Amino acid sequence: MKSILIVEDDLTFSTMLKTWLGKRGFVVDTASNNARARKILHQQDFDLVLSDLRLPDEDGLYLLSWLRNMGNNTPFIIMTSYAEVQNVVDAMKQGASDYIAKPVQPDILLKKIDDALHAPLSMENKTEQTRSEADHDSYTNNFLEGESEAARMLYNYVRLVAPTPMSVLINGASGTGKEYVAHRIHQLSKRADKPFVAIDCGAMLKELAASEFFGHVKGSFTGAVTDKTGAFVEANGGTLFLDEVGNLSYDVQVQLLRAIQEHRIRPVGSTQEIEVDVRLVCATNENLEQAIANGQFREDLYHRINEFTLKMPALKDRQEDILLFANFFLDQANRELDKDLIGFDMNAERALQTYSWPGNLRQMKNVIKRATLLAKGDFITREDLGEQMMETRPPVSQNSYALHDAVSEKERILQALQVTNNNKSKAAQLLGIDRKTLYNKLKLYQIS
């Protein structure tokens, strides 16, 4: 188990953080000032130090500097509620692994801790690790699953269905990460050492669909100058992913159904059948049941590809994941554009959280990459995010649940807890307060 030293003079917050991290498998010790932290660090090694910027004796930068001067390269994350840009910049220059603003959002902190703990120690190791990971799985390296309840439920289902032979239908809007989920199913399946082949049915010409799926022999039609191996043969033993399967023509659906039922395919122009064994994972952003009712999709094919359904949540329904993804995409953009931005200022974070994200994760990645290129300072501002981010959906915390006066506070807190099924993180967001404030008010009003 990984060990963490928390250096924080707010004992209530420190205890709450220690308990929360302990439940996630970390061994946690605490210190309330620099002197105590240095003494503990002299006596014991830790995998990570999480320190407040402002401490009673010297600040967190002093502790960081002392640690580095001792030749200790333990990952170090600074916490600050003062939004002092220069101090954050100084911390990063002195060797801090990362920073996080208060009030701390637990999911973001967990992501930053994980990143810091898994960061390689040298550029040489970093290059080697990156190359190795990219060769192993580009999807895993370029995607974040998230920590929201919707994400946890989705990937619990993924882990449940992956080892089975069941065909899976992934339903969700464009840009929600359907191909990553398909690839993750393959990774966790018993076919992980076999091929994963992806076909975009939306970009497939009707006339060439049979050739794409089943292959063809030379001379079977005009333009067939060589033999072609189809997707079913390429994926033999592994997983075949059909994206936007709802776009297939009715004739192609008939051919696909036969291949699935009989586990045999015949290349176009060939007299020989080939036996194939593939696990089918399909994805769509259409309502296939409605397409069946309209006569556009075969019901028998639908039942063949839909032994298990996964529903992809929209980004706007994953509030806890929005800043998590934003920082993840910023890290990617920094690497791709050779930039070194630290994060987002307060107004930019608010815009990210209140925007409706119709294009989901794909849109967010593009917005943040553009903002990274345009940013002139160390932090991305709301203006860097572009005009589209100025038109946001009103956050719920500014409507019916915000705490306006002491008389209605208890009632509004109870309403927020009821709406969020007692999820305190979501309730705090609805109320426009941080978790610590919510816990204090729960205690004040004796709400269990």
Image (tube, rainbow, N blue to C red):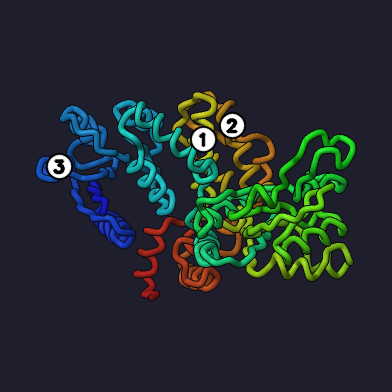
Q: Residue furthest front?
A: 271
Q: Is residue 57 left or right of residue 26?
A: left
Mark 2 lies on a secondary structure that is helix
Mark 3 belongs to which amino acid?
Leu
Please give the residue where the numbered disc 1 appears in the rendered image. 332
Give me the C-alpha separation between circle 1 and circle 2.
12 Å
Residue 32 vertical position relative to residue 152 in the rendered view, above or below: above
Quadrant the N terminus occupies: bottom left
N-term mark: 1 or 3: 3
Please give the residue where the numbered disc 3 appears in the rendered image. 41
Q: Residues within 10 Å of mark 2 (few under 14, many from 20)?
A: many
Please give the residue where the numbered disc 2 appears in the rendered image. 371
Residue 390 vertical position relative to residue 436 in the rendered view, above or below: above
Q: Residues within 10 Å of mark 1 (few under 14, many from 20)?
A: some
Mark 3 lies on a secondary structure that is helix
How far from the left and from the top, in percent, is residue 17? 30, 56
